[in-house]
Image: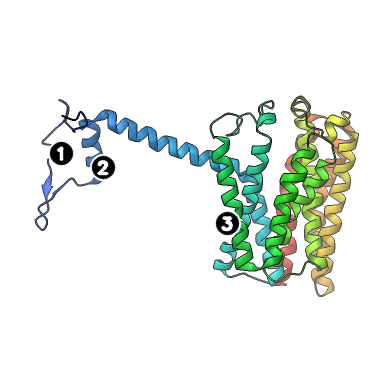
Amino acid sequence: MSSNILVPDSSYDADRHRARFDSGTGVAVLDPPEEFMEVMAQANPAAMDTLSRAETSLRAIVSDLVQLTKPRIVVMILVTTVATAMIAAGGLVPVGTMLLLLVGTAMVAGSAGGANQIWEREIDRNMPRTAVRPLPSSRLSTGLATAYTASMGTIGLAILLLGFGIAPAGVGLATWLLYVFLYTPMKTRTSWNTTVGAIAGALPMLIGFTALGGSLASVTGWLLFGVLAAWQYPHFMAIAWLYRRQYEAAGFRMSTTVEPTGVSAAVQSIVGSMAVIACGVGLCLMSPGMVPAAIGSLAVLAATVPMLKASIRFARSRDDVTARRLLRSSLLVLPAVLAVVTIRVFW
């Protein structure tokens, strides 16, 4: 006889868990459902333990697949996509249209992040900052990660192509190729990888812009691109300084490992901060009327000058304290500038 037959153990309380009968069907029903699970747990603890472990394992896999996409970067990209889509549309975008755009963009961006982690899985084992990722820690198999990444990227590009046209899909494909096949291998070869990474990271601005009718020839679109590309310099230089020893140990050629005094990183931070100001003010000056343009420009200055000051402090001291302050400052600047240049379309 099978050993899988459910036999209640001696602790099973029959009076407490007595079934009621549905008069219409004659079927025994345990109500509420929680009582059924409690009865099953008492009847066959081993089976319920196996079920619980399977559920926990599934949740862990889903969590690891999400981590594979670099969710923080994806969220940042989606925020910029919302802003650029509204700027291109000249106002609010229908919810369904926006959701479809965000899904397609998120899948392409997440696929690129996953491909990057697949490529760097061996190197990531050498950095405490990245050793806990799903692949270097062996929580996910390379085969599953590859299948997931390829499927997600293909579906995302299909959504952009069929839902919004060839321009946003083309920008999405260019972003993926540039990030995966150029930026990723360059990280171990030259410190110019930061520039290529900034371009790849800013291209999604044009996905949202072209999806809602903006042209690739538009000055507005390229100024939006410039805001995000320039912002990445102070943001990433702060990170590169704080983790410079880990980058060096892993073999990454960053500005802070090639030129360890930090002078180059500081200069790039200052130039990047100034470029953010220039692009942000340029977008505001394109507003119709002097008053909206002036108000928008002042708002951009108020939002970005603190990052410029933090960059200058970092240039003077070049230590972990000033780098950390620069990093925190940069996190506030991008959403603030995007908010200003987006609000101006409603003036």
Give the Cα separation between the discs numbered 1 and 2: 11 Å
Residue 34 in the figure: left or right of residue 261: left
Residue at image x 87%, y 42%? 268
Q: Secondary structure at mark 1?
A: loop
| Upstream in sequence: badge 3 or badge 2 | 2
Image x and y of residue 31, in percent: 19, 47
| Quadrant placement of the N terminus | top left
Residue at image x 60%, y 33%? 133
Amino acid type, mark 1 = His
| Crowding near the residue tagged with mark 1, few <14, some 14–19, many ≥20 C-alpha atoms within 10 Å | some
Image x and y of residue 55, in percent: 39, 38
Amino acid type, mark 2 = Glu
Residue at image x 12%, y 56%? 25
The reply to whether residue 333 is visible in this rendering is no
Amino acid type, mark 3 = Ile
Q: Secondary structure at mark 3?
A: helix
Closer-to-camera residue (137/75): 137
| Crowding near the residue tagged with mark 3, few <14, some 14–19, many ≥20 C-alpha atoms within 10 Å | some
Residue 257 in the figure: left or right of residue 126: right
- Name of the residue lying farthest toward the bottom: 289
Q: Secondary structure at mark 2?
A: helix
| Badge nearest the viewer, 3 or 2 | 3
Q: Is the C-beta separation of discs 3 and 1 under 8 Å?
A: no
Image x and y of residue 88, in percent: 71, 69
Image x and y of residue 343, in percent: 71, 65
The residue that disc 3 covers is 155
The residue that disc 1 covers is 17
The residue that disc 2 covers is 34
| Badge nearest the viewer, 3 or 1 | 3
Is residue 137 positioned above or below 300 on the image? above
Give the Cα separation between the discs numbered 3 and 2: 39 Å
